Amino acid sequence: AMKMNTAYLSMTALEEILQAILVGITAEEGLKFNRAFLALFNATGTILEGRLAVGPGCREDAVRIWQEMSTKALRFRDIIDSIKEHDFQEDSEVNKIVRALRITSDNRDHLLIRAATERKTINVCHGQCEFPVPVDLMGLLQEDSFVVVPLYSSSRSLGVIIADHFVTGKEIDSPLTHALESFASQASLAIEHCRLYTDMEEKIKQLELVTHELEANKDLLVESERYSALGQVAAQLAHNIRNPITSIGGTARLLSRKTTDPQQLKFFDMMTMEVTRIEQTLEDLFNFVDTSPVKKERVLIYPLIIKTLMLFYKTMQKQGITYQAIVPEQLICELDPNQIRRVLVHLVRNAVEAMEIGGTLEVEVTKNLEYNQITVRDSGMGIAAADLQRVSDPFYTTKVAGTGVGLALVERIVKDHRGTLHIRCRDSGGTEVIVTLPSALKN
């Protein structure tokens, strides 16, 4: 037993653990059952599915297989490898049997579901036990005497082990049943350990992706913050300088029309010219976004979406925001990836900032012969109807610390792609932003 426990508790691959469990049940140095079948609940817990089995397809096979292994004096690890060669092939008879096992969890009266959910060992002897034994189950196993032992953790039912003496016909007595229960308890720990390990690996991979994206795109984030800082400066300049400059310019033009003195006209014209220059500088601040030409290329849109979401992963986790990307993984669009990435960064940032106390963020991409459509939906506070017409105006914002630059940048890039930007309030609450870009065929 110690060898078996050590073997499967040291494994992390679920399939390998299941194989070790079944070998332990049937091996000569294990519990010596002739056959063992293992069924586990699916990820949602709604279906009990046969996963793996070990044992001879017929009684003649049993004698040959075990004689070969006993004459070689194999160790437990060698036995696992030898059993794999004989019985873990997908087309083996026992695996054909186990793959036919598929029972919905709402079938509470089924013998296997009852054993799993009630965490109760059931010993069937010649088709009889304290509960009704399904005839189709006995027909599938081609055996009317077997034991069903549950697999479970502290929080959930995992599945069942079915074991029998298909070859020898020996009685499955209480000591052997207790031994199998003890073994199943350790096997349950190994399966749960494997699943936790797999979950942890997925979390690590996700964190590695986040770290990689933050590192690879730190310049993009800095650029985004630079836009924000420049927008604040520009907004302040517009507020504090533009109105008095306009007054000065207007006064200079008015005075220039009321004098004929060449010297005064020279100064008034200089004032008018300098005021015009300052006004143009302020106008440039309104249009500070990158005006480089669009450089379209054929790109996979899915990685672009996922990488953008990963930039805000920590913020979304902190604010309790769940996200979903509804994007065909192989969808190719023709666009400028750098500029569209800026669009996605601003739209996702706005959506995240609108959901300070949690919500749902959804990014969906659809395509037809003429257009590619990127839709960003959030369940935040939404936008007031009076503000909808102005949200993409440069420096117009309803945020306390906002600048109104982001959506102006988005609209400019979309227009440079000959696309359209549409923003609306959702009936269910929140905002929906739709970016429509011409497809390659349309272009």
Image: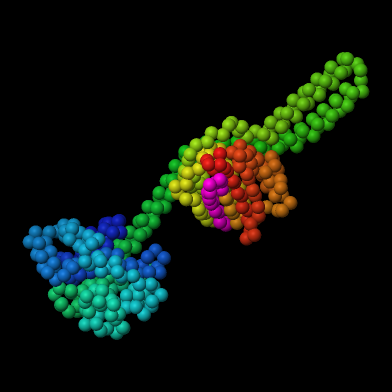
Q: Check if residue 361 falls in the magenta segment.
A: yes
Q: Quadrant of residue 59?
A: bottom left
- Residue at (81%, 24%) from the top-left corner? 272
- Residue at (88%, 26%) from the top-left corner? 254
- Secondary structure predominantly adopted by residues drawn in magenta: strand
291 sits left or right of 28 in the view = right
Q: Is residue 243 above or below residue 315?
A: above
Q: Position of residue 219 (x, y in %)?
A: 52, 36
Q: Which residues are magenta?
A: 356-374
Q: Check if residue 214 falls in the magenta segment.
A: no
Q: Quadrant of residue 117?
A: bottom left
- Residue at (13%, 75%) from the top-left corner? 168
Question: How many numbered circles are shown?
Answer: 0
Q: Position of residue 209 (x, y in %)?
A: 44, 46
Q: 115 or 109: nearer the eye?
A: 109
Q: 423 or 218: nearer the eye?
A: 423
Q: Position of residue 328 (x, y in %)?
A: 47, 50
- Residue at (56%, 48%) from the top-left corner? 373
The quadrant of the picture occupied by the N terminus is bottom left
